[in-house]
Image (cartoon, grey):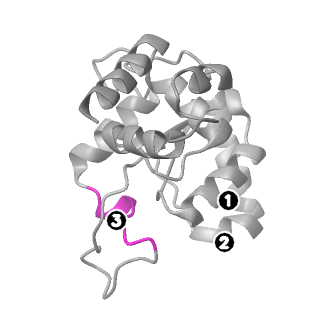
Amino acid sequence: FDAVIVETGGFGVFNDTEKLALLRRLSEARGLIILTDSDGAGFQIRGYLKGALDPDKVKHAYIPDIPGREKRKKTASRAGTLGVEGMRPEVLVEALRRAGATFEGEGHTGHGGGEIPAAELYALGLTGRPGSSELRLALLKKLGLPEKLKGAALREVLGALYTPGELAAAVRDLIALQ
C-alpha cells in the first residue's frame, strides 16, 4: 500500500499523547482507517480511538476471526485467532475495501450507507429473540467479520458494508441452510 501506516503500540496508545496527536492530524488531513486485531484487546483500542478521533474522518476495517497461531509467535493468542500480522494479504485488502478504502485507479467500493437500525436487526432475528445469538454468530462467520461485534459497532459495520437488502438476503440464505 502507498499509505501511512501507524502502529498503535497496543495499549500504549492510551498514554501516548504524541501518537494520538499524530493520528488526529492524519485523520484531519487525509482520513484514517483503523485496523486492529479482532480480539478483545483490539476492540478496546478501537473503542478508545473512536472516542478520541473525529468520526467523520475515520473508517473502520475489520478482519475475520481466523483460528491459528502467527508464525512469529511460539503460542497462539488467548483468543486462538490470527491478528492483523497473521492475515493473508488478500484478506487485508478485502477488509480495507469493505471499509470503503479507495485504491489507485478505482472509485469508492464500500456502501457507506450508515448504521443499520436496531429495529432492523431485531426484525431479521439477529437480536432480542430466541436463537438470535446463534444466528448472529453464524452471520458474522459467513460475512467474515469478528464474532465480538455487538451493539452499535455491529450496526455500524453492517451498515458500512451492506445495504439493508443485502443483509436481509444474507440472513435468509443462512436460515435456509439451517
* Image position, residue 152 (x, y; %): 67, 36
Q: Residues within 10 Å of mark 1 (few under 14, many from 20)?
A: some
Query: In the drawing, does residue 153 fall left or right of residue 14?
Result: left
* Image position, residue 41 (x, y; %): 58, 66
* Image position, residue 134 (x, y; %): 45, 46
Residue bearing the label numbered 2: 12
Q: In the depicted view, which residue is nearer to us: 61 or 27?
A: 61
Q: Say what amino acid the circle numbered 1 marks.
A: Lys
Residue placed furthest toward the front: 130
Q: Quadrant of residue 25?
A: top right
CA separation in Å, label 2 and label 1: 9 Å
Decide if residue 160 is in sight here: yes
- Residue in view at x 36 percent, y 17 percent: 169
Residue bearing the label numbered 3: 82
Do the numbered discs 1 and 3 sit on residues whose CB atoms are within 8 Å? Answer: no
Main SS class of the magenta portion in the image: loop
Q: Residues within 10 Å of mark 3 (few under 14, many from 20)?
A: many
Does the magenta segment cover residue 175?
no
Q: Residue 19 — which label?
A: 1
- Residue in view at x 54 percent, y 23 percent: 159
Going from N to C along the chain, the mark reached first, 2 or 1, is 2
* Image position, residue 3 (x, y; %): 41, 42
Residue 134 against residue 17 in the figure, above or below: above
Do the numbered discs 2 and 1 sit on residues whose CB atoms are within 8 Å? Answer: yes
Going from N to C along the chain, the mark reached first, 3 or 2, is 2
Q: Say what amino acid the circle numbered 3 marks.
A: Leu
Q: Which residues are magenta?
A: 79-87
CA separation in Å, label 1 and label 3: 25 Å
Going from N to C along the chain, the mark reached first, 1 or 3, is 1
